[in-house]
């Protein structure tokens, strides 16, 4: 049986942590290496991690200084020894069949380097039955470039936690430290480098929508990192002569500029940020005007 490393970054999640780890420990596939990365959490999370490790010898606990979500995930990847990697955020939980379904799909004759699956949004404090029986549908596979296109056309596919990866894909890739929207920087590169990507149309991950999450807050300057994300993506595909992916990236860049401009316009103190966005629109105007997706 192949070993699967499950990386869980932990920071200020006291009310969610036990549920999350329980959903991992109760997987029907038991050949697991569970890595809890305590990212300098100031509450009892560190102690809770140690207590959980006492109950299951598959759990390893890494305590480190706070460095943010990307840094915690990178630390977990460095420690991992499994052939496959799965990321679970500590305020979420997973269906008990997810690893079994992914492993069975990945190890088939036409298996894939990355297995993608669906997820369900759950409200804060909503009860989740992660033990419910899930039956896997037939896996569809695509090459790396086609998988990236599917990912770009489906916003929910850009996240890192609804996929199982061959750990070898992370040999030269890491999450960008200290930045939000970290999945946006990395996921498309992982998909592009994969020889084959599999898709299972069944919901196996329960994503908790927290009231104080980044996605529910108003515009702030940190959101401008999205400009860097899309500019990097445009250069990435242009340098590789991937014309269609390049044009899709340009189209998405245009839409994110429009969105950020509208959000920043809600408050007068973001005049400087609006100017930055307008300058970007002007600089890329020729690319926007000839883009077939626009």
Image: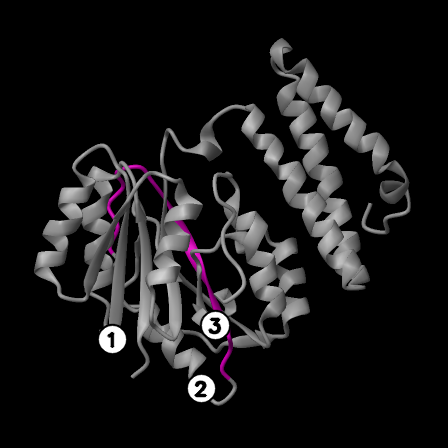
Mark 2 highlights which residue? 108
Q: In the rendering, at what x and y percent does residue 17 appear?
A: 22, 46
* Cβ atoms at labels 3 and 2 below 8 Å apart: no
Mark 3 highlights which residue? 168
**Magenta stretch: residue 115 in it?**
yes
Q: Which residues are magenta?
A: 111-129
Q: In the rendering, at what x and y percent does residue 182 appear?
A: 51, 46
Residue 31, which numbered label? Answer: 1
The mark nearer the N terminus, 1 or 3, is: 1
Foreground mark, 3 or 2?
3
**Magenta stretch: residue 278 in it?**
no
Residue at x 68%, y 68% (from the top left corner): 145
Q: In the rendering, at what x and y percent does residue 122 appear?
A: 35, 44
Please identify the quadrant where the C terminus is shown: top right
Under circle 2, the secondary element is loop
- Quadrant of the image occupied by residue 11: top left
The mark nearer the N terminus, 3 or 2, is: 2
- Residue 207 lies, with reference to residue 173, above or below; the image says above
* Cβ atoms at labels 1 and 3 below 8 Å apart: no
């Amino acid at each position: 049986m192949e070993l699967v490393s499950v990386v869980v970054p932990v920071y200020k999640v006291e009310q969610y942590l036990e549920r999350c780890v329980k959903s991992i420990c109760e997987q029907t596939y038991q050949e697991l290496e569970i890595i809890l990365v305590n990212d300098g959490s100031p509450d009892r999370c560190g102690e809770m991690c140690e207590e959980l490790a006492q109950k299951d010898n598959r759990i390893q606990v890494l305590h480190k200084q706070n460095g943010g979500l990307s840094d915690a995930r990178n630390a977990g990847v460095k420690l991992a020894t499994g052939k496959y990697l799965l990321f679970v955020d500590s305020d979420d939980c997973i269906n008990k069949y997810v690893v079994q379904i992914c492993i069975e799909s990945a190890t088939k004759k036409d298996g894939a380097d990355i297995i993608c699956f669906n997820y369900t949004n759950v409200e804060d404090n909503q009860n989740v039955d992660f033990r419910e029986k899930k039956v896997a549908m037939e896996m569809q596979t695509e090459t790396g470039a086609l998988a990236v296109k599917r990912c770009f056309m489906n916003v929910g596919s850009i996240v890192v936690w609804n996929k199982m990866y061959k750990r070898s894909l992370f040999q030269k890739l890491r999450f960008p430290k200290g930045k939000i929207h970290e999945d946006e920087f990395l996921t498309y590169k992982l998909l592009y480098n994969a020889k084959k990507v599999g898709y299972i149309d069944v919901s196996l991950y329960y994503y908790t929508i927290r009231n104080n999450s980044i996605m529910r807050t108003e515009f702030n300057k940190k959101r401008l990192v999205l400009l860097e994300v899309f500019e990097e993506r445009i250069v990435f595909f242009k340098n590789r002569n991937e014309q269609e992916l390049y044009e899709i990236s340009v189209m998405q860049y245009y839409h994110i500029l429009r969105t950020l401009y509208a959000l920043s316009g809600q408050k007068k103190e973001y005049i400087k940020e609006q100017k930055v966005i307008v300058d970007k629109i002007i600089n890329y105007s020729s690319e926007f005007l000839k883009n077939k997706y626009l």
